[in-house]
Image: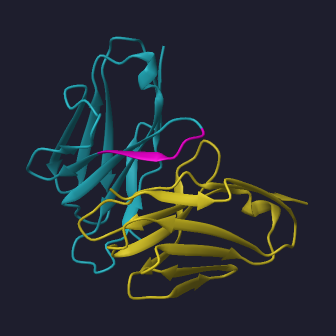
Amino acid sequence: GAVVSQHPSRVICKSGTSVKIECRSLDFQATTMFWYRQFPKKSLMLMATSNEGSKATYEQGVEKDKFLINHASLTLSTLTVTSAHPEDSSFYICSAREPGQGAFEQYFGPGTRLTVT
Amino acid sequence: KQEVTQIPAALSVPEGENLVLNCSFTDSAIYNLQWFRQDPGKGLTSLLLIQSSQREQTSGRLNASLDKSSGRSTLYIAASQPGDSATYLCAPGGGNTPLVFGKGTRLSVIA
């Protein structure tokens, strides 16, 4: 199957700083990528849908000015957590869908664990 | 808005048992449904994908069924092993919509 990578896998930052997480589709072009967040012992919650060449679509309750998403190319989407606070500490997972495939399977990255101190 | 419920929330069984994990969803207008496993602190491992036109899919000891009209899917695990211990997530979606996840079933298989 297709491969999606994320970088970094773990990051610790201080409160008030910004952190950028990269999501790459390694062997296919993804016009659409998705960003999810998972709190400890909770399920994955969709944060936003990232579309190449256009603005991201955010889910209700997700602050678009705090979680900046840039889908600059068909293989790269970035999520920047701005002015991070301890409550932003979470597991962030991206996924990408391979276009042209009827099943529209979503492939997931390995996740990024963010800790804000 | 799609809502996904997984039952049971947690399950502890002795090694060798066959077991069934249940998933129900409210919006049957889906293209496919995926089952994942997640180990503690790790990402997702895709187990099975069932397209909306299919009734079931099998991979090794795993069998997933889909009844789209009633909004139900089940994951059957045969001859469970301690290595099967993980959280199992059900996610309907596909097409132009993202996957929506249930809260998962936390499985513990005891040797």
Q: Tell me, yes or no, if residue A3 can be seen here.
A: no
Chain letter for the cyan colouring in the rendering? A
Is residue B60 depicted above or below A91 in this figure? below
Quick check: is A43 in the magenta stretch?
yes
Q: Is residue A31 left or right of residue A112?
A: left
**Exactly how many numbered labels are in the figure?**
0
Q: Is residue B107 left or right of residue B96?
A: right
In percent of the image, x 28 and y 81: which residue is there? A102
Q: Residue B58, image x and y in percent?
A: 59, 84
Q: Residue A85, image x and y in percent?
A: 39, 16
**Closest to the observer, B67 or A30:** B67
**Closest to the observer, A6 or B25:** B25
Is residue B34 depicted above or below A12 in this figure? below
In percent of the image, x 55 and y 51: which residue is there? B103
Q: Residue B48, image x and y in percent?
A: 52, 74
In percent of the image, x 27 and y 30: which residue is there? A80
**Closest to the observer, A26 or B103:** B103
Chain B painted colour: yellow
Q: Is residue B4 left or right of residue A94?
A: right
**Which region shows up in magenta?**
A41-47
Q: Tell me, yes or no, if residue A54 can be seen here.
A: yes
In percent of the image, x 41 and y 25: which residue is there? A88
The N terminus of chain A lies in quadrant: bottom left
Quick check: is B95 in the magenta stretch?
no
Coloured how? Answer: by chain
Q: Is residue B33 left or right of residue B98?
A: right
Q: Residue A78, image x and y in percent?
A: 26, 40
Is residue B76 depicted above or below B25 in this figure? below
